[in-house]
Amino acid sequence: MIEPSGERLQKVLARAGFGSRRLCDELIEEGRVTVNGEVAELGRRVDIAQDKIAVDKVPVGVLPGLVYYLVNKPAGVVVTASDPEGRPTILDLVPTTPRVFSVGRLDYATEGLLVVTNDGELAQMLTHPSHGVEKEYLAEVAGEITPLALRRLREGVEIEPGLVTQPARVAHRGDQMVRIVIHEGRNRQVRRMCEAVGLTVTRLVRVRIGPISDNQLAPGVSRLLRIDEVRALAEAAQVSPRRERGR
Ligand code: URA
């Protein structure tokens, strides 16, 4: 008799955090699980290195050992693996093993949320320009926040010759504070957008990445993302519209 190859799908799903094996069998029975795009049958076996598994159409990271941290970066931390100048790096804020990297970047002076992981596939989805997951920032600015400045920020501004930012959601929040939601990730984008309309950013905090926010996470602290958060991120990276109308 030929031995069936691969691992049982319900076991793989249970290990990935979808609950007990019985619950995972129920997911399969309900037709919510696909393998390589086809609805999986109960008893299905998979090769976790090859097969693409999805639950409710959202890809599932099933390779053992994947980790996902949410980090609240303080100002004065660099987002690189090592810094020749010896400054603290984002990797000082997460466990040393397994080796991980940050998804996207924040400037040295910028604070706020970053995802750090060893899941290259999710990282690629999140940073790919065509997926454009929303990022929300609070910017404290110096200068006069005029209705015209807000409108220009919303509609798109030229931040370098020939490069106009895509429409953004922008709101005036309190005296010198602006909330800006963008889905591009250009170098120093928010600072340069503000500069283009005569405002100087004096403090910049990223408060949301797609569906992920956490105002309880103290600066300099990291925590593991929950499975539902990882899935929500993957989903946002898949379905984010490329463009949105500014308002
Ligand atoms: N925009 C910026 O200007 N800086 C960041 O770190 C992130 C977005």
Image (cartoon, rainbow, N blue to C red):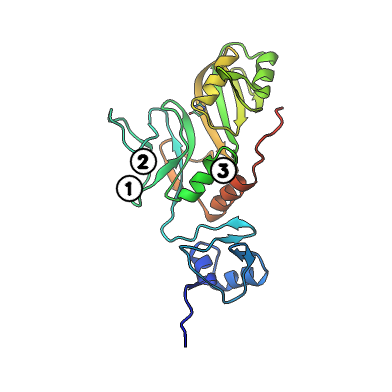
Above or below 83: residue 36:
below
Above-or-below relation of 181 to 211: above
| Residue at the disc numbered 3 | 212
**Label 3 residue SS:** loop
Residue 89, percent from left and from top: 35, 35
Q: Earlier in the sequence, mark 1 or mark 3?
A: 1
Q: Does label 2 or label 1 sit earlier along the sequence?
A: 2
The residue lying at 56 percent from left, 37 percent from top is 129
Asked whether the beta carbons under mark 2 and mark 1 sit within 8 Å of each other, the answer is yes
Q: Which mark is residue 36?
A: none
Front residue of 155/204: it is: 155
Residue 64 at x, y percent in the picture? 43, 61
Looking at the image, which residue is at 70% across and 15% down?
147
Q: Amino acid at mark 2?
A: Leu
Residue at 47% over, 88% down: 1
Q: Which residue has dot 2 on it? A: 91
Q: Which residue is mark 1?
A: 96
Distance Cα–Cα, label 3 vs label 2: 20 Å
Q: Quadrant of residue 210?
A: top right
